[in-house]
Image (cartoon, grey):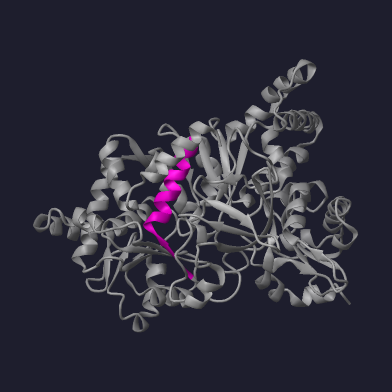
């Protein structure tokens, strides 16, 4: 860290606000007329200033106070990512309460558990579907006094519309004009701000207790890096019930940039061309899908276009590797790169709006092959790392200091070290204060002096952090050899543009096997090329041609691996993994144990 950055970081972190609510009100007062958010309204986008956001947040906060919500009471949000999610969250915080986040894909049983375990007093429910989940468990939720629906209408009793709540708040402010400011004034850095229930790869979700100082620190630390300014425009689609999305909101409050917000993944690429953001956070699967889609579509067209495309990326990769080493292309290579940029790379960047300075990748490992492919096209992906238990932001690469295959450097103010077995330990203001109602589980991962056991195995080289695998995911074959599945899975998705998922298996088995899923979009042009047009997805992936294609890419993968890591047998699943089926978390991470259990018979058949 340079001396200037160190000084800026120290000042920003030491002088941070007492709470996220304080930070929000300061942002409204400091830049009232600047754009805060834009959001879809039919086929158009509407823009709102910080003052406009502030007016609605005050009404929502006052409405909650009128309903009897008190300091640190929990108020839940069950909704997809949208502008009203932000309004609800900020309204909860400005009422002095704490937000309980609920993924909209969560089943009714788990919704009932989360609302009961958190003792949530009020629920913001996106629509009738979310209301029904709470209603199904109403008898078990005596503390839940009201449901506020974002899209539906009230029932005159238990359910209010958002407009009803805001009107209630405005009426309450008429008799209590300083109610919101008074509630915010009572908040301290250690006041509970958020309960995020980990989606969990096994067992019941655990409520992670994140206080205001966790989020305020994250915002201050990101601001101190100097990578973002008030003139930036973020495209925000990540689940706001997840810490990755939430930390980007904290950064927005600290820095003051605008966010275009729309959680519909199917609209992402089209919206990027319209919004023209300067940065965006995403899970690796998004970048893998873009990479696969572009490569397969271009190759499906064939001819001169495919040859030019492949030539351009050979040139681009050579330039990328020079730049990774701190050098610039010169001579004939520089001329070739200029031509490649005009013919291929500029068109790719235009698909993302043409103004992207960098993407931010988090929530799972991004393989360096994919990162290098984007970099070859002039698009830098800054990889970061963190857990729900660390308020998302623990490390991140910098625009001038990155190393593909690593997750960057620690945020200023965060300490990282390795345990004897290679487990990554983290200490800093962003670390949770514990699991809600689970003191024993808290003690297992959080030491008295504040070190969090992350459960991730890693390495540190020149300050850069490299994640090798989840401690619980490490495979030990019956021959006693250890295998890190995530590293192998990431390599395969970097090699094979048709891959959606590779699930490496082999714990206590005599060799390593794998389950494979193929990307439905990428397979469409492939099927046409191989005489399978018009066939169902299942017919396509079960074909001998598809199996031969996968085997070819696995052969390339195996050539990179140690003998005991190589995949000896595999099965292609008849469909891709989904969040809805419980095979992926809402942040698109693999639920390994769930998938292995679901496909036990398939895996067993590979060892017959």
Instruction: Say whether residue 179 is magenta.
Output: no
Residue 65 shown left or right of residue 399 in the figure: left
For the residue pair 349 and 482, the one nearer the viewer reads as: 482
| Residue at x 89%, y 51% (from the top left corner) | 559
Q: Is residue 322 visible?
A: yes
Percent x, y of residue 473:
70, 67
In the displayed orientation, state which residue is furthest to the top.
Answer: 331
- Where is 534 relative to 481, above or below? above
Above or below, 483 against 311 in this view is: below
Quadrant containing the C terminus is: bottom right
Picture mark count: 0
Q: Residue furthest bottom?
A: 139
Q: Could you say where residue 491 lies in the image, as x and y percent from the top left?
A: 76, 51
Picture quarter containing residue 601?
bottom right
Residue numbers of the magenta segment:
207-226
Magenta stretch: helix, strand or loop mostly = helix
Q: Look at the image and say whether residue 209 sits in the magenta stretch.
A: yes
> Where residue 329 sits in the image (x, y, percent)?
73, 22
Residue 195, picture quadrant: bottom left
Q: Quadrant of the N terminus?
A: top right
Q: Residue furthest front?
A: 449
At x 34% / y 84%, what residue is drawn?
A: 139
Q: In this view of the protein, can residue 277 be seen by the observer?
A: no
List the single residue furthest toward the left: 175
Residue 187: quarter of image: bottom left
Horizontally, is 415 left or right of 157 in the view? right
x%, y% of residue 182? 19, 56
Residue drawn at (46%, 51%), measured in percent from left and top? 247
Q: Is residue 88 left or right of residue 69?
A: right
């Amino acid at each position: 860290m340079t001396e200037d950055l160190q000084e800026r970081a120290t000042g920003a972190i030491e002088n941070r606000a007492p709470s996220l609510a304080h930070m929000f009100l300061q942002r409204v007062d400091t830049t009232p007329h600047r754009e805060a958010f834009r959001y879809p309204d039919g086929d158009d986008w509407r823009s709102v200033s910080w003052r406009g956001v502030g007016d609605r947040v005050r009404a929502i906060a006052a409405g909650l106070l009128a309903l009897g919500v008190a300091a640190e009471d929990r108020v839940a949000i069950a909704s997809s990512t949208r502008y009203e999610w932000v309004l609800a969250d900020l309204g909860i915080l400005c009422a002095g309460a704490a937000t309980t986040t609920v993924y909209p894909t969560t089943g009714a049983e788990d919704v009932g558990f989360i609302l009961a375990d958190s003792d949530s007093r009020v629920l913001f429910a996106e629509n009738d579907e979310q209301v029904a989940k709470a209603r199904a468990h109403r008898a078990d939720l005596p503390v839940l006094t009201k449901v506020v629906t974002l899209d539906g209408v009230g029932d005159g009793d238990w359910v209010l519309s958002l407009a009803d709540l805001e009107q209630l708040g405005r009426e309450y402010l008429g008799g209590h004009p300083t109610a919101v400011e008074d509630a915010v004034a009572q908040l301290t850095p250690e006041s509970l701000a958020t309960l995020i229930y980990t989606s969990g790869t096994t067992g019941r979700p655990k409520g992670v207790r994140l206080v205001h100082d966790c989020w305020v620190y994250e915002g201050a630390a990101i601001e101190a890096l100097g990578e973002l300014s008030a003139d930036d425009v973020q495209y925000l689609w990540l689940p706001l019930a997840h810490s990755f999305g939430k930390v980007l909101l904290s950064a927005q409050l600290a820095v003051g940039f605008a966010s275009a917000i729309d959680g519909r993944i199917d609209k992402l690429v089209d919206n990027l061309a319209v919004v023209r953001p300067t940065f965006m956070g995403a899970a690796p699967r998004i970048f893998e899908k873009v990479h696969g889609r572009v490569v397969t579509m271009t190759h499906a067209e064939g001819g001169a276009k495919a040859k030019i495309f492949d030539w351009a990326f050979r040139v681009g990769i050579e330039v990328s590797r020079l730049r990774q080493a701190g050098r610039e292309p010169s001579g004939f290579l520089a001329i070739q790169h200029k031509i490649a940029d005009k013919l291929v790379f500029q068109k790719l960047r235009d698909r993302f709006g043409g103004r992207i300075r960098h993407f931010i990748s988090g929530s799972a490992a991004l393989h360096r092959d994919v990162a290098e492919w984007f970099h070859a096209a002039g698009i830098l992906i800054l990889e970061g790392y963190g857990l729900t238990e660390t308020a998302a932001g623990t490390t991140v690469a910098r625009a001038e200091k990155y190393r593909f295959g690593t997750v960057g450097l620690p945020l200023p103010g965060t300490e990282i070290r390795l345990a004897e077995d290679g487990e990554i330990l983290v200490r800093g203001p962003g670390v949770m204060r514990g699991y809600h109602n689970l003191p024993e589980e808290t003690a297992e991962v959080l030491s008295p002096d504040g070190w969090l056991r992350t459960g991730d195995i890693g390495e540190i080289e020149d300050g850069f952090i490299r994640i090798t695998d989840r401690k619980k995911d490490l495979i030990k074959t019956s021959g006693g050899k250890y295998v890190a599945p995530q590293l192998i899975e990431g390599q395969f998705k970097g090699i094979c543009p048709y891959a959606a998922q590779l699930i490496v298996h082999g714990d206590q088995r005599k060799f390593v096997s794998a389950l494979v899923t193929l990307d439905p979009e990428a397979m469409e042009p492939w099927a046409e090329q191989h005489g399978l047009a018009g066939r169902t997805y299942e017919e396509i992936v079960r074909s001998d041609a598809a199996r031969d294609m996968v085997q070819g890419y696995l052969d390339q993968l195996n050539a990179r691996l140690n003998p005991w890591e190589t995949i000896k047998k595999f099965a292609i699943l008849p469909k891709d993994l989904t969040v809805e089926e419980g095979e992926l978390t809402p942040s698109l991470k693999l639920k390994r144990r769930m998938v292995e259990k679901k496909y036990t018979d398939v895996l067993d058949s590979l060892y017959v």
